[in-house]
Image (tube, rainbow, N blue to C red):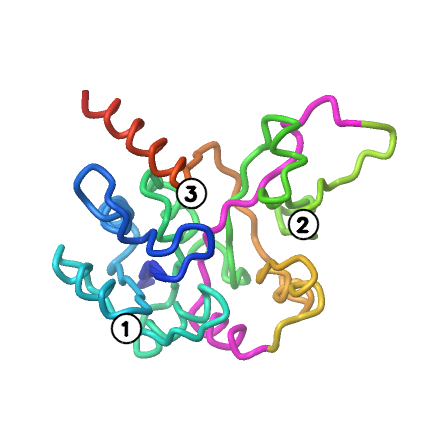
Amino acid sequence: MKAVGVLPARWASTRLPGKVLVDICGKPLVQHVWERVRQCKRLSEVIIACDESNVLERCKAFGANAVLTSRDHPSGSDRVSEATSRSDADIIVNIQADEPLIDPVLIDDLVLALENDEACVVATPIKRIGSALDFNNPNIVKVVVDVNGHALYFSRAAIPFKRDGEPSDHSRYFRHLGLYAYRRDFLFTYCQWSKSFLEQEECLEQLRILEAGYKIKCVETDVDSIGVDTHEDVQKVINLLRRKTS
């Protein structure tokens, strides 16, 4: 099976505008992500889907296969869909363009989940929650799964809700990591659907899939990453990279 990875690189980030080009140790943020993703063993190609010409030019300057997409896409998946509209890939992976320390193994595991299960149309990673702070943080998306590892629901709320007080063991609860591996035909079909009620209420695009009656395979991982959303996150990543090189 042929698999491609796509980084939707949106310039107009709400909390940190232009973050995909913010300098981190002499390179733009998106270049760090691209270099990590290129280490994946199961991707035959990596594409950066840009929404502004300045991002496109910068990506091409460091050697990336970059394409210009519409500014008006409501989600990263829609941008990925446009960027791969002419691709012959069987599997398309939507990879966050703001995680410069992403582990390539995480992406390969998602591709494997689809390769090993013909019935699986979309897979996404989940990780055990380690603290009450994360469990109650609405910016961290929680997920509950069935016995086969399929998502039952995603929420910004603390789920499952423990009626008799705060959970004593948060490691039995899961957070969602925002990557998706899709079968090509399913991605294009899904992106044509209108936003669903649950998706709009929670501002979580994956709920459109569940509400339509499809399954999302959750792949548990112990790998973590850092998403860059603020200037503080930028400094955190710089410090980590400096430690690794020293």
The image position of residue 223, as x and y in percent, is 43, 34
State the mark number for residue 155: 2
* Discs 1/3, front: 3
Q: Which of the labelled discs sits on residue 51, or is there none?
A: none
Q: Secondary structure at mark 2?
A: strand
Q: Magenta part of the protein: which range?
A: 166-193
Residue under label 1: 68
| Residue 40 shows in this picture | no
Mark 3, residue position: 230
The CA span between labels 1 and 3 is: 25 Å
Contact check, label 1 and label 2, Cβ < 8 Å? no
Q: Amino acid at mark 2?
A: Ser
How far is mark 1 from mark 2, CA to CA? 32 Å
Among the two numbered marks 1 and 3 on one chain, the one whose residue lies closer to the N terminus: 1
70 is within the stretch colored magenta:
no
Badge nearest the viewer, 2 or 3: 3
Residue 219: percent from left, percent from top = 52, 45
Q: Given the image, on which type of amino acid does mark 3 rest?
A: Thr
Q: Amino acid at mark 1?
A: Leu
Q: Which quarter of the rendered picture does the C terminus lie within?
A: top left
Q: Position of residue 28 (x, y in %)?
A: 23, 48
Of the two numbered discs 1 and 2 on the same chain, state the one appearing first in sequence: 1
Query: 159 or 232: nearer the eye?
Result: 232
Residue in the picture at 69% in, 66% down: 211
SS class, disc 3: loop
Q: Is residue 99 above or below residue 162?
A: below
Q: CA distance from mark 2 to mark 3?
A: 23 Å
- Residue 152 shown left or right of residue 228 in the figure: right
What crowding class fits label 1: few (fewer than 14 Cα within 10 Å), some (14-19), or many (20 or more)?
A: some
